[in-house]
Image: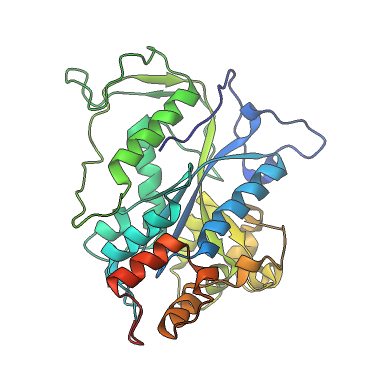
Amino acid sequence: MVWQLRHIETQKECRPLDQREGPTRTMTETTKTHVILLACGSFNPITKGHIQMFERARDYLHKTGRFIVIGGIVSPVHDSYGKQGLVSSRHRLIMCQLAVQNSDWIRVDPWECYQDTWQTTCSVLEHHRDLMKRVTGCILSNVNTPSMTPVTGQPQNETTQPVYQNSNVPTKPTAAKILGKVGQSLSRICCVRPPVERFTFVDENANLGTVMRYEEIELRILLLCGSDLLESFCIPGLWNEADMEVIVGDFGIVVVPRDAADTDRIMNHSSILRKYKNNIMVVKDDINHPMSVVSSTKSRLALQHGDGHVVDYLSQPVIDYILKSQLYINASG
């Protein structure tokens, strides 16, 4: 899978999200923020609603005229999360991959599942930011400290043969080609392709072997979530406040409302959400979108009760895999 960008010719100044140009300014691709959407969760199982969440977020961000979404990442939670009825990561990763197999921009990343124990959402965001730096040499902007200088990536080892060699790549690749290489490299490193019995972990620190010098772009990883996760930020003691500061203050959030939730009311209940309100983008398309009521819980119940409406919640390849593997059929999960 390759995340594509059209050619970028000029440099740009990066600014915080709340200081971007207003609607009276015409924005070109060079002045837009390039975004990777990251969704963390159980995906137990992954539903049509999860995929629609990515699509709705991308469409909304594009319509604002300020963003270009170049990729989406699905990151299933670790087995030790402790949620009742959580099936193994082996099954959940395969179901996720089946759900996105026809997408040209969403991929599944198993890093979170591969760790020794459960990881915080903050640590997953930081991992992907750091991985992107290692793969591309790129310094990713965050909301409060955007990059202001051209970026030069340095090779990890100039004397060894590159792991991924392409003799047709010019000495100074464009930003578009660099981000294409990001997609190729991360897909080889992280993507899970069913069916598999064992997951082979490829060293993400593998030397890519070339000096990458390219025009500056503004690239950010944003957390994609439903309004139910946003509401959980308001529950005292549930989230570490330092983590919340990083998630909302440094990275930023894209929220897709569920069940016509009042996101303004939710944000007013948290001092941190109020503080960083300009870093929270709420998708305002159709508040009665049919996928906004779809959930993994409803899907599991439908499977347990033999409810034919399960086809409204899950894609057919995911249903086929669940039936073949006898998942969620018993009330115990």
Rendering coords of residue 309 (x, y %)? 54, 76
At a point 35% along the width and 51% down the height, the residue shown is 109
Where does residue 111 sit, x and y in percent of width and height? 30, 53
Quadrant for the C terminus, please. Answer: bottom left
Question: In the image, what residue occupies the spot 50% across and 74% down?
Answer: 310
Q: Residue at x 47, y 75 (%)?
A: 299
Left of 187 or right of it: where is 271? right
Q: Is residue 9 above or below residue 18?
A: above
105 vs 80, nearest the viewer: 105
Q: Is residue 296 above or below residue 15?
A: below
Quadrant of residue 184 within the rendered picture: top left
Q: 30 or 286, which is in the foreground? A: 286
Q: Quadrant of the N terminus?
A: top left
Question: Does the rendering let one see residue 118?
Answer: no
Residue 137, quarter of the rendered image: top left
Question: In the rendered image, which quarter is residue 122 located in?
Answer: bottom left
In the rendered image, residue 328, in percent from the top left (x then y), is placed at 35, 78
